[in-house]
Image (cartoon, rainbow, N blue to C red):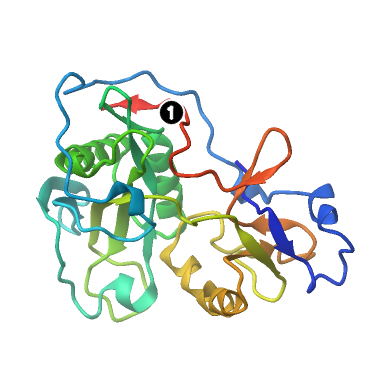
């Protein structure tokens, strides 16, 4: 899915005379190719006839911010074991790590993001979590990290969602955002891959990332990705470099940025909104009754 905006400021694009020019030569870098595969059938389904219990949340006021839920999932990889093992659910809370850990010193880490949705019958769906597992494995290879297997990833995500099922919003009123993290947590002063790693999954109920119509500004000085870099994976180091231009854009009244490719500055690299089938630009309301197809849990 391409993500762009209804309202775009093109004042900074001297080489582009109209907004449409942006899209006439639209190209996606190879590393941005979506991971698309066939939808799998439901693996299992539970409590679909059970009356759902909900947390005490004002679902209509949800934004995209952290709401502390009940549980998170933690699994470790050690130099001795050479594999991820003994994953467990634990109460959501702070974690400890060495000040010299690879994630803190050198940014050796990845994250994923996926959502669990409530169905009309109060069952819960996950949308293609296996694709997120595969993308994490691809990113881990690029960052010289071990990764959980697809089965381990799927199991961790499902257990996290089910342990926090009362935080999955009612049908049509939001979703449970699930954030898997892969972090280098071994002691490491030198510039080299870590010896120990932690895989952690937490979740939070969320609404729309943006509220209301989007008003995006084209950013042509800062780039999200460059050839040979890590733009094709969800490395933790990819995100904070855009805080400065994003903060400046919001100070001017814009809601977000639209980034261009680093080579030519004429092709769209990344943005946040939706291209509809009728060629209109949209930021669908959270209560939009979209039909979800995915894995039942």
Q: Quadrant of the C terminus?
A: top left
Q: Which residue is mark 1?
A: 292
With respect to residue 50, does 199 lie above or below? below
Please state the horizontal and vertical placement of residue 214, each as a whole percent of the image.
Answer: 60, 58
Rendered image quadrant of residue 265: bottom right
Please state the horizontal and vertical placement of residue 101, each as a whole percent of the image.
Answer: 26, 74
Q: How many marks?
A: 1
271 sits to left or right of 208: right
**Residue at (29% x, 45% y) in the render:** 148
Judging depth in this view, the residue of 93 and 38 nearest the camera is 93
With respect to residue 171, does 234 lie above or below? below
Q: Is residue 99 visible in this depiction of the protein?
A: yes
Q: Quadrant of the N terminus?
A: top right
Q: Secondary structure at mark 1?
A: loop
Judging depth in this view, the residue of 215 and 163 nearest the camera is 215
With respect to residue 157, does 182 lie above or below? below
């Amino acid at each position: 899915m391409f993500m762009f905006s209804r309202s775009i400021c093109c004042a900074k694009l001297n080489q582009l005379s109209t907004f449409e020019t942006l899209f006439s030569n639209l190209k996606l870098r190879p590393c941005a190719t979506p991971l698309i595969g066939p939808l799998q059938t439901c693996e299992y389904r539970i409590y679909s006839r059970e009356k759902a219990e909900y947390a005490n949340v004002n679902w209509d006021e949800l934004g995209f911010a952290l709401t502390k839920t009940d549980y998170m999932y933690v699994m470790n990889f050690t130099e001795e074991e050479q594999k991820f093992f003994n994953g467990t659910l634990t109460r959501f809370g702070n974690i400890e790590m060495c000040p010299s850990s690879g994630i803190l010193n050198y940014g050796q880490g990845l994250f994923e993001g996926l959502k669990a949705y409530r169905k009309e019958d109060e069952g819960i769906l996950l949308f293609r979590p296996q694709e997120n597992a595969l993308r994490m494995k691809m990113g881990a290879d690029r960052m010289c990290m071990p990764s959980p297997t697809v089965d381990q990833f799927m199991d961790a995500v499902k257990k996290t969602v089910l342990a926090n099922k009362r935080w999955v919003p009612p049908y049509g009123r939001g979703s449970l955002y699930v954030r898997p993290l892969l972090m280098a947590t071994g002691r490491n002063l030198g510039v080299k891959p870590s010896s120990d790693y932690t895989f952690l999954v937490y979740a939070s109920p969320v609404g729309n990332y943006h509220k209301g119509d989007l008003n995006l500004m084209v950013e042509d000085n800062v780039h999200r990705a460059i050839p040979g870099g890590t733009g094709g994976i969800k490395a933790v180091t990819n995100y904070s470099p855009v805080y400065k231009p994003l903060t400046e854009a919001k100070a001017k009244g814009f809601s977000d940025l639209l980034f261009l490719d680093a080579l030519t500055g004429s092709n769209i690299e990344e943005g946040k909104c939706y291209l509809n089938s009728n060629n209109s630009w949209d930021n669908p309301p959270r209560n939009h009754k979209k039909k979800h197809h995915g894995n039942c849990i």
